[in-house]
Image (spheres, rainbow, N blue to C red):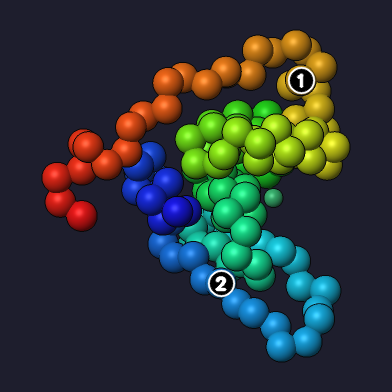
């Protein structure tokens, strides 16, 4: 899914690696090298991947431009109930996201979801 998102938006990510731990660890869920354009994930949650992808796309830390990119990815690749959930979570965790919603910025409401499938000629 993250790979598709990267492709759809021409986000120049080199690789996404997912690693697992045999034992509980305090590893970060995800980390990104915006310079080398690589992503390491420690869980396989879609939202974590989108979060990191938004860093590469925006080439920014947890700033407003990053939030906007992240929300755009949310809208396109997550289900409606997940969008609400993660938007609230993002607002709780990141100042830029909180500020954006406090400023009453109309966070884009759903364009018509692009139909997937019928435009795809080759898989
Ligand atoms: Zn981050």
Q: Which residue is mark 1?
A: 101
In the image, is residue 34 above or below residue 77?
below
Q: Is residue 27 left or right of residue 45?
A: right
> Looking at the image, is mark 1 or mark 2 earlier in the sequence?
2
Placement of the C terminus among the 4 image quadrants: bottom left
Q: CA distance from mark 1 to mark 2?
A: 32 Å
User: With 65 as the anchor, is 38 left or right in this view?
Assistant: left
Q: Nearer the viewer, residue 42 or 109?
A: 109
The answer to whether 58 appears left or right of 25 in the picture is left
Residue displayed at 74% across by 21% down: 100
The answer to whether residue 63 is seen in the rendering is: no
Q: Position of residue 96 (x, y in %)?
A: 76, 30
Q: Report which quarter residue 93 is drawn in.
A: top right
Task: Please name whichever residue, 73 or 32, is drawn nearer the observer in this view of the structure.
Answer: 73
Point out residue 108 in the picture as x, y percentages from the top left corner.
57, 18
Residue found 20% across the figure and 43% down from its top: 120
Is residue 91 left or right of 51 when viewed as pictured?
A: right
Q: Residue at x 47, y 53 (%)?
A: 2
Image quarter in which the N terminus is found: bottom left
**Residue position for label 2:** 18
Q: Position of residue 20 (x, y in %)?
A: 64, 79
Q: Secondary structure at mark 2?
A: strand
Q: Position of residue 21 (x, y in %)?
A: 70, 83
In terms of secondary structure, where does tag 1 sit?
helix
Determine which quarter of the picture holds residue 101.
top right
């Amino acid at each position: 899914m993250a790979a598709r998102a990267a492709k759809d938006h021409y986000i120049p990510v080199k690789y996404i690696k997912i690693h697992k731990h045999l034992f509980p660890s305090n590893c970060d869920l995800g980390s990104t090298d915006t310079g080398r354009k690589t992503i390491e994930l420690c869980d396989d949650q879609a939202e974590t991947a989108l979060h990191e992808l938004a860093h590469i796309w925006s080439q920014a830390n947890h700033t407003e431009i990053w939030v906007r990119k992240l929300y755009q990815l949310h809208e396109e690749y997550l289900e409606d109930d997940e969008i609400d959930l993660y938007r609230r979570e993002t607002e709780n965790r990141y100042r830029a996201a909180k500020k954006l919603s406090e400023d009453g910025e109309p966070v884009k409401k759903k364009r018509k979801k692009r139909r997937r499938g019928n435009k795809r000629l080759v898989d």
